[in-house]
Amino acid sequence: MQYEPFSIRLTSPLSTAGGEITRRAGFVVRVERDGVVGVGEATPLPGWTESVEECERALASAAEAGRPLEVLEGSTHPAARHGVELAIADADARAGGVSLATFLTDGSSADSVPVNATVGDDSVDATARATREAVERGYRAVKVKVGAQDPTVDEARLRAAREAAGDGVELRADANGAWDVPTAERLLDVAADADVSYVEQPLPADNLSGHAHLRGRGVGIALDESLASLGVDRVLDAAAADVLVCKPMVLGGPRRALSVARRASERGVDVVVTTTVDAVVARVGAVHAAAALSNVRACGLATGSLLGSDLAPDPAPIEGGTVSVPAGPGLAGEAFEGLREPSE
């Protein structure tokens, strides 16, 4: 096993639970299996996974071991584990001559995955304009960021987004845990009137009882930060969500993401797959993970444009609100051989 660091500038600063970041730093991981080399990516995100320094130490320990994935089992280094698991899965799928999605399902998988556009916090007019432009580009699902402004402004923004989207477009909202229960109740009623399908993380991550209370108001409740910080079992046992937002980098790899999806499905909870604003290797891995799900909803995979450069040309570009799954073998055939630090 080998790993190499990289650092990519973002097109604009990104606010996270760990503070504002301007670059995505991580590691390209390579694992050889029976003469076939697979590629993975470990890109920690502050506030969601281990730090970059902790990730590098974990990868160093894994590289010294004969069975690198076993070293990371049960660890608190999900990004490092993701990089190693993805590299191993890529190598095994390439050896088998099948795409990663097919390999993960031991059978058939989707050829394409619908994706949602994301509209950031902005004025009412800008929100309507961005929503309209996304629909014109072919997106059939649009997520509006809310929670950073006064609730009255967000009420107007959701109504404007619905009017701009028109009929037949799924509208979502993401509050990133910004509201208290009374504010969430008020905004959920507005969201129901605007035919919003679900609101993501309306309350802080640890308030599972509050999220359970908010369900059944005509708008689904999706949990993201809660899943990362508390784990799938606590979220499901609390009956706190209608939808789980699964980030393979945060969960420790594509197989773990699919395991969470299966457990959620057994409890009648939907799943969407999203990235953590990763570089191209992990993004393509998330595309394959989403393609391995049955009847997957639009996923949060259209994040490549947030990077100022990348590790390689994207073999799975977004077109018309969908992403085609690379046919393989593995992640994307030969597309990721000879990756280099991006020049900026």
Image (cartoon, grey):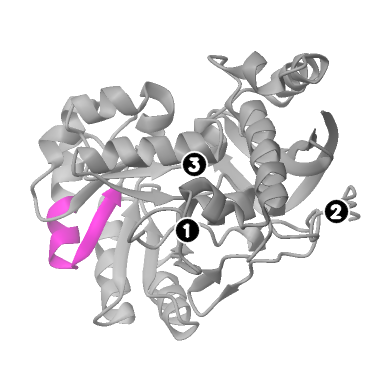
Region of the chain picked out in magenta, as a range: 188-199
Camera-side mark, 2 or 3: 2
Q: State the residue in front, 131 or 293.
A: 293
Q: CA distance from mark 1 to mark 3?
A: 14 Å
- Residue at x-position 54% and y-position 28%: 47
Q: Quadrant of the C terminus?
A: bottom right
Label 2, on which residue? 337
- Residue at x-position 35% and y-position 37%: 177
Answer whether residue 321 is magenta in the image. no
Q: Residues within 10 Å of mark 2 (few under 14, many from 20)?
A: few
Q: CA distance from mark 1 to mark 2?
A: 23 Å
Can residue 279 be seen here? The reply is no
Q: Secondary structure at mark 3?
A: loop
Q: Quadrant of the N terminus?
A: top right
Q: Which quarter of the picture shows residue 84?
A: top right
Q: Percent x, y for residue 135?
A: 42, 80
Label 1, on which residue? 291
Res. 72 mark: none
Answer whether residue 194 is magenta in the image. yes
Can residue 2 be seen here? The reply is yes
Res. 247 mark: 3
Instruction: Say whether marks 1 and 2 touch (CB < 8 Å).
Output: no
Q: Percent x, y for residue 238?
A: 18, 26
Q: Is residue 281 above or below residue 68?
A: below
Q: Percent x, y for residue 289?
A: 50, 50
Q: Secondary structure at mark 2?
A: loop
Q: CA distance from mark 2 to mark 3?
A: 25 Å
Task: Return the disc, 2 or 3, that comes first in the chain's sequence.
Answer: 3
Q: Which quarter of the picture shows residue 264?
A: top left
Q: Residue furthest bottom?
A: 136
